[in-house]
Amino acid sequence: MVTEIVPINAFSDGDATHLPQPEWKHANPTIYLEKLAAQWKEKQGSARPGVKYYLDRLPNGYVLFERARPSNAKMVSWESMQPENSVVANGFHED
């Protein structure tokens, strides 16, 4: 597979002075550099089949953060949040 590095310019609206709470840590942006580059090339209409795209970096002032899930985290389904006698059709709640 061919890999193409997509350069971005230095202009950015990112602001490095706005940081999340201390429980958030810097994360590896590699997967996002790949996904953003692919979407960008597709939106421009210049994506080619069989080519894997990567941004050369995040825009100035942007950083990817992550945090650990709480130990008691659980997944909640949409259906479990609905009243018992209601029907959900096409994503809309009907009584």
Image (cartoon, rainbow, N blue to C red):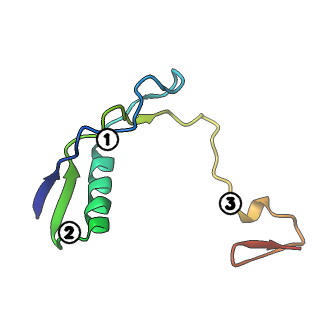
- Which quadrant holds residue 82? bottom right
Say which residue label 2 marks.
46
Q: CA distance from mark 2 to mark 3?
A: 39 Å
User: 60 or 89: nearer the eye?
Assistant: 60
Q: Are marks 2 and 1 in contact (CB under 8 Å)?
A: no
Say which residue label 3 marks.
77
Q: Earlier in the sequence, mark 2 or mark 3?
A: 2
- Residue drawn at (25%, 71%), measured in percent from left and top? 45
Task: Classify the position of the N terminus by image quarter.
Answer: bottom left
x then y, percent, for residue 67: 49, 33
- Which quadrant holds residue 90? bottom right
x then y, percent, for residue 30: 27, 44
User: Mark 3 belongs to which amino acid?
Assistant: Ser
- Residue drawn at (68%, 60%), measured in percent from left and top? 77
Disc 2 residue crowd, few under 14, some 14–19, many 20+, Cα 10 Å: few
User: Mark 1 belongs to which amino acid?
Assistant: Pro
Q: CA distance from mark 3 to mark 1?
A: 29 Å
Give the structural element (helix, strand or loop) at label 3: loop
Q: Earlier in the sequence, mark 2 or mark 1?
A: 1
Left or right of 74, for residue 88: right
Task: Classify the position of the C terminus by image quarter.
Answer: bottom right
Q: Residue lying furthest bottom in this view?
A: 89
> Residue 29 has which mark?
1
Give the structural element (helix, strand or loop) at label 1: loop
- Residue drawn at (19%, 44%), measured in percent from left and top? 56
Left or right of 63, for residue 7: left
Disc 1 residue crowd, few under 14, some 14–19, many 20+, Cα 10 Å: few
x then y, percent, for residue 66: 45, 35
